[in-house]
């Protein structure tokens, strides 16, 4: 009888585990559908452009996103949105698998880690990342893999994990420069850990560092051949100290933005758990907690410091929330197991509310541009919302196609004021032509290396501008052509008639190449 009860309980747990795993697969399938329904945003088409110009590195960032898109599109053979974005839902699924494996390794249980792996998908910014392919996705993947390998090393004590950590760190650096946080994270962990401090004097961490440096070396080589423009761009983004008032303003915007992309209650839970994890790790000499808290607190403190120099973009710190989420799950589990029945109910209700809020925020983000009542409820003006980047690009490309066909004899090259617009045109215009960007009027970017305007003398251009960034054609640009003519103005609207953007199309005839500074490689003063 007793054995029968045990057997029934085991079968019940298996059914629950299979059901939870099935939920993860359903989420993956839904995201595979979603990636075909939303226009590629400018960042995605820009990185798709990178994948058509494979290089050791790029102006804006490390090359991994370009390599990934090249692989998923089979090096340009299959360029539909499905193939361009395929890695995004795949990475999202892998993050859930990593969370499950780490928590299972730590707790020795199966069901609770599976539940938390599913709950990871309630975080709004991770839901957005599950359908958009940007370089942050790849950094998140390899940063999280490095955390997994570090935890496995701590629990198993097997030295070969150091070499795997070196490989994953190198791949993370090839994804985004802020993966360099792995170095101070590992150093801080070794300094805090009484048991593992001896590794400061062993060869394994240093070999791991060497492995990661070798993998990252192509980026250094590329920069050395291109006047270190990528690193100069990074320094520009980092900014310089402004004033205490600006710091307070940036700090407020940073906290509000993080609460928005994580959802308020989850952000509060994660913040408390980060520092609670550090306290537990130090008090109990628990190296798992020390590693996870170092992996989340060190980057978070850095971005707080950055608020004194620049406005921290909401997506910059996203990678730190993976180890912070793991800490939140471990702290919640400890708290639940040691609490009385009434407290347990409160914990369940509060966490339930937190994850429900996260799911609600995710749904609102995705449907507000498409579902009018939601947009009105939250007073979302589509033309000023960040979500405008998901809308209207196909219509712009259709108008460009019409003009290109009408003026076919002029053999028009396509150019834009902003590299984002140029990239959308490259992707959605028929035939996916190479496009150009007049970077003099904005910051430098990868188009600075592609444009080569010197060889375009005498050519005619279709010049496309989004009037949000300047209502009319630049006079100084027009002076470099024999004639400049506005041929079309389009107000692009969503299906409810709400304006997304206004686009103007100009034909610029006979490029004179008079102002050579305006068209040189890095013509913009802004890096």
Image: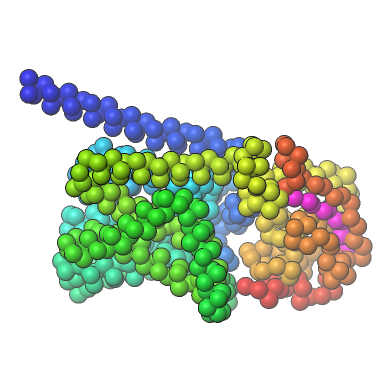
Query: Looking at this view, is 217 or 148 the one in front?
Result: 148
Q: Residue at x 48, y 61 (%)?
A: 255
* Quarter that holds the C terminus: bottom right
Residue 447 in magenta stretch = no
Q: Residue at x 42, y 57 (%)?
A: 319
Q: Position of residue 341 (x, y in %)?
A: 22, 40
**Type of secondary structure dominating the magenta stretch:** strand
* 331 displayed left or right of 428: left
Q: Position of residue 318 (x, y in %)?
A: 45, 57
* 341 displayed left or right of 65: left
394 shown above or below 523: above
Q: Residue at x 82, y 75 (%)?
A: 515
* Quarter that holds the N terminus: top left
468 shown above or below 408: below
Q: Position of residue 149 (x, y in %)?
A: 28, 55
Query: Looking at this view, is 391 or 139 the one in front?
Result: 391
Q: Position of residue 160 (x, y in %)?
A: 22, 59
Report the label total. Answer: 0
* 469 displayed left or right of 138: right
Q: What's the magenta region?
A: 501-510
Residue 444, quarter of the rendered image: bottom right
Residue 109, quarter of the rendered image: top left
Query: Looking at this view, is 201 or 222 the one in front?
Result: 201
Residue 503 in magenta stretch = yes
Query: Looking at this view, is 352 or 180 the one in front?
Result: 352
* 368 displayed left or right of 260: right
Q: Can I make out residue 36 in this image?
A: yes
Q: Residue at x 37, y 41 (%)?
A: 352
Residue 226, quarter of the rendered image: bottom right
């Amino acid at each position: 009888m007793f054995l029968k009860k045990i057997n029934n309980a085991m079968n019940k747990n298996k059914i629950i585990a299979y059901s939870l795993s099935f939920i993860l697969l359903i989420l993956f399938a839904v995201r595979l559908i979603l990636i075909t329904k939303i226009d590629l945003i400018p960042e995605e088409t820009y990185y798709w452009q990178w994948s058509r110009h494979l290089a050791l590195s790029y102006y804006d960032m490390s090359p991994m996103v370009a390599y990934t898109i090249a692989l998923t599109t089979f090096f340009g053979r299959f360029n539909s949105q499905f193939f361009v974005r395929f890695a995004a839902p795949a990475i999202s699924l892998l993050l859930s698998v990593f969370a499950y494996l780490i928590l299972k390794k730590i707790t020795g249980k199966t069901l609770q880690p599976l539940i938390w792996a599913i709950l990871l998908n309630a975080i709004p910014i991770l839901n957005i990342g599950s359908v958009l392919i940007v370089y942050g996705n790849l950094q998140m993947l390899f940063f999280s893999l490095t955390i997994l390998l570090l935890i496995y090393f701590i629990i198993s004590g097997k030295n070969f994990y150091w070499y795997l950590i070196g490989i994953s760190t190198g791949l993370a650096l090839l994804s985004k420069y802020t993966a360099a946080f792995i170095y101070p994270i590992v150093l801080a962990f070794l300094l805090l850990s009484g048991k593992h401090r001896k590794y400061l004097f062993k060869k394994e961490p240093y070999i791991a560092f060497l492995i990661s440096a070798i993998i990252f070396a192509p980026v250094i080589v590329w920069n050395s051949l291109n006047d270190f423009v990528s690193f100069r761009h990074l320094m520009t983004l980092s900014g310089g100290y402004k004033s205490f008032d600006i710091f307070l303003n940036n700090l407020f915007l940073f906290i509000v933005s993080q609460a928005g992309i994580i959802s308020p209650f989850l952000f509060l839970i994660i913040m408390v758990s980060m520092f609670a994890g550090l306290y537990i790790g130090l008090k109990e000499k628990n190296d798992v907690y020390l590693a996870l808290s170092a992996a989340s607190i060190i980057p978070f403190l850095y971005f707080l410091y950055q608020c004194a120099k620049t406005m921290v973009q909401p997506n910059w710190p996203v990678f730190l929330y993976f180890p912070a989420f793991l800490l939140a799950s471990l702290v919640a589990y400890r708290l639940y197991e040691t609490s009385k029945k009434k407290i347990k109910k409160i914990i369940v209700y509060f966490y339930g509310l937190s994850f429900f809020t996260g799911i609600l925020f995710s749904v609102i983000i995705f449907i507000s541009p498409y579902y009018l009542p939601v947009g009105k409820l939250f007073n979302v003006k589509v033309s000023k919302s960040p979500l405008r980047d998901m809308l209207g690009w196909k219509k712009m490309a259709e108008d460009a196609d019409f003009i290109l066909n009408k003026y076919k004899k002029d053999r028009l090259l396509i150019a834009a004021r902003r590299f984002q617009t140029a990239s959308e045109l490259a992707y959605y215009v028929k035939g996916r032509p190479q496009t150009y960007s007049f970077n003099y009027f904005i910051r430098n970017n990868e188009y600075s290396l592609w444009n080569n305007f010197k060889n375009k003398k005498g050519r005619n251009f279709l010049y496309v501008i989004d009037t949000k960034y300047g209502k009319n054609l630049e006079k100084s640009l027009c002076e470099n052509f024999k004639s400049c003519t506005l041929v079309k103005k389009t107000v692009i609207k969503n299906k409810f008639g709400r304006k997304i953007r206004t686009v103007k199309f100009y034909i610029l005839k006979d490029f004179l190449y008079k102002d050579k500074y305006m068209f040189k490689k890095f013509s913009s003063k802004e890096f």
